[in-house]
Amino acid sequence: MSDSEEYEYEYDESDQEAMDDGGGGNGDDEEQSFDYTDDEGDSQPQEDGEAALENSYYNAKSERDDDELAEARETFESVVRMEIAQNKKAAGIDTSEDGGGEENDAMDVEGGDNVKSTNLTTPLKYHGSWSYKAIKQLVKLHLRSMDSTAIMKDYSRMFRVASASDAGISPNYMEKSVNRMLDRVSNLVAAAGSGGGGEGGNASHVIAQNVYGKCNFMCTL
């Protein structure tokens, strides 16, 4: 097992975030628990939706822990699609044709149809805290495979979800997430360096430069 893989399993940052945040606030607690009741009424569909998102998210984490990485990526993406569909439905938007898929999310941006989908700093609508957490897990999976294109695509998407007004991601939670992601990248570079550098070391340095550059750019907006 490489040093980078050991770092991946040293701790699950979600557990640490839960302790740091003290379990308070919507979207601030990675491992937040949900209270289920037998009460009927308008809140029941929302609870069912939350339970479905929670179950899918933890199924993806189980797949990841079992090294079923391709399955985990798809399940994490399904969490995003599911939450988008739920939020669109709550907003009265028909998703029967697009299914809330990622290929249609590009225009789900704040600012209306006049905003170009190619603007990677534009906040994404209809995403929520589960989408954010799932995308963050995708970035970590991409870091394992050193897929620089996928890393930056989902790292940008993570920022876009967090910056949306209706996502429910607090600045404090976002700061902690980004700092831990930067620590992860730093450890990746250190592990590559201890292995003698070479192609892997060069790739890790390029990834680090891109990730840190993206962070610096977004933090100045």
Image: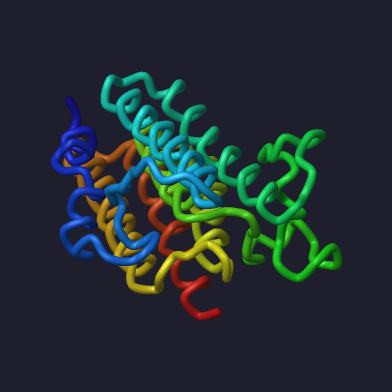
**Percent coordinates x, y for residue 193 in the rendering:** 22, 45
Placement of 122 over or under 89, stated as above or below: below
- For the point 39% across and 24% down, which residue is it? 69
Q: Is residue 90 visible?
A: yes
- For the point 32% across and 42% down, which residue is it? 201
Q: Nearer the viewer, residue 198 or 36?
A: 36
Q: Nearer the viewer, residue 87 or 171?
A: 87
**Percent coordinates x, y for residue 150 in the rendering:** 53, 40
Residue 195 position by quadrant: top left
**Percent coordinates x, y for residue 197 in the rendering:** 27, 40
Q: State the quadrant of the C terminus.
A: bottom right
Q: Is residue 151 visible?
A: no
**Percent coordinates x, y for residue 20 in the rendering:** 18, 64
Q: Is residue 48 left or right of residue 145?
A: right
Placement of 208 over or under 66, stated as above or below: below
Judged from this view, the residue extending furthest toward the right is: 114
Q: State the quadrant of the N terminus.
A: top left
Placement of 70 over or under 32, stated as above or below: above
Q: Nearer the viewer, residue 151 or 79?
A: 79
- For the point 22% across and 33% down, which residue is it? 5
Q: Nearer the viewer, residue 201 or 187?
A: 187
Placement of 119 over or under 67, stated as above or below: below
- For the point 43% across and 32% down, which residue is it? 56
